[in-house]
Image: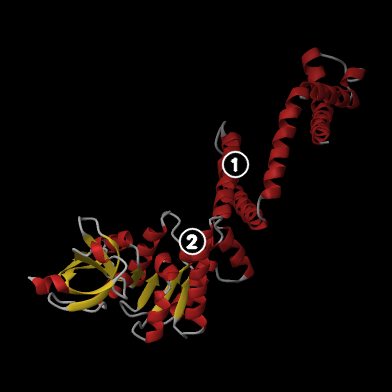
Amino acid sequence: MMKKVVHLFFTVLGVVLGYQFCPDLFIRVFHMNNQDVLTSNWFGAALGGAVFLIATMSVAGYVSALLRWLEERLKSAPLADILGGTIGMVIGLVVAYLFSPEIRSIPIVGIAVQFFVAVFFAYLGLRIGFTKREDLLNLFSGRLSAKERAEKERDKRPAMRPGEAKLLDTSVIIDGRIADLVETGFLDGTLVIASFVLEELQHIADSSDVLKRNRGRRGLDVLNRIQKELKAVVQIVEIDFDDIQEVDSKLVRLAKQMNGKVMTNDFNLNKVCELQGVPVLNINDLANALKPVVLPGEELHVQVIKDGKEYNQGVAYLDDGTMIVIEGGREYIGGRLIVQVTSVLQTSAGRMIFAKPKMLEKAL
């Protein structure tokens, strides 16, 4: 159908041009009489239509293909893009028309320059209208743009003090201890949850892996508890950084913008924040700091669980998960005994206690 329309267009164009110019062409070139049949306007129209129809047989296919491609693009393009581009192109053509009298007065090349100027302004208006489509539509509708509305709403919100915003990352939400910490009242300020953190959490909750899915759902339950049960001040920030792919890097940049602190359990994110000068709150560091202080010489009543890495060592654990390495404790695996602390080692993984059975100390 499109090809037939293109053929019809070229045929009509040939008929009009033949009707207008063929009689004069035959008279001036072939020196024919005005009364000759070949010099009649209707013969010229028929000849022009036939010539254009035959000459454009191969061109019609390319033109129809171009029109189909343009039609598909227009169908898939949003209405706002079409309206913005059209408005911009019309404005560009109007501007070109205002310059046309002066350009047309240029000797020899005036008409050609006018054509190219019109095409240039039309394309320029189309690009500007497409890029600024929201501003154009909002200008005609008398509304503020989305960016202006966001800035206006942001200006209405009370500004946070430095360090008041606590930005939660995915690991600390999934961990769950943040809810208990908020419940105790030791954590004040505003808990900020970025939209890209929520997207990552939802992606984990929708994972095909059962373990990841359970962790993601637990994180969503923790957020729900913080918002509804604990009455904490929670703010969802709809900010994203398209030039950054990693969620941790986005969180660090957002913390810089909001002058806030990052709450995490991730060791790597902890180091990145320290390198970039962003305050960070690590719950694991807090948990290690709150573990009971054990001094060399103290006695502990423990149960030996398994053997250690070195020869004749036994391993036990305190209630808070602190590992106790017992020299000569391998033979007591499965039993309980009293040990005496010899040294305490603080590592990045936590606290480790070294001890030996009390009975050996007595024997010595």
Instruction: Tell how many labels.
Output: 2
Q: Secondary structure at mark 2?
A: helix
Most foreground residue, 20 or 253:
253
Residue 127, placed above or below residue 327: above
Image spot of residue 342 (x, y percent): 13, 70
- Residue at 82% x, 25% y is 53
Residue 135 visible in this rendered orientation of the protein: yes
Q: Amino acid at mark 1?
A: Val
In the rendering, which numbered label is found on residue 119? 1
Q: Residue at x 20, y 55 (%)?
A: 311
Label 2 Cα crowd, 10 Å radius (few <14 / some 14-19 / many 20+): some
Which residue is at the far top? Answer: 30
| Residue 211 in picture, x, y percent from top left | 50, 60
Tell me whether the residue at label 2 lies in contact with that at label 1, contact meaning CB atoms closer than 8 angstroms: no
Q: Is residue 203 left or right of residue 172?
A: right
Q: Residue at 55% of width from left, 71% of height from top?
A: 144
Instruction: Say whether residue 348 is visible.
Output: no
Please identify the quarter of the rendering in which residue 52 is found. Answer: top right
Can you identify the residue that label 2 sits on?
200
Q: Nearer the viewer, residue 163 or 351?
A: 351
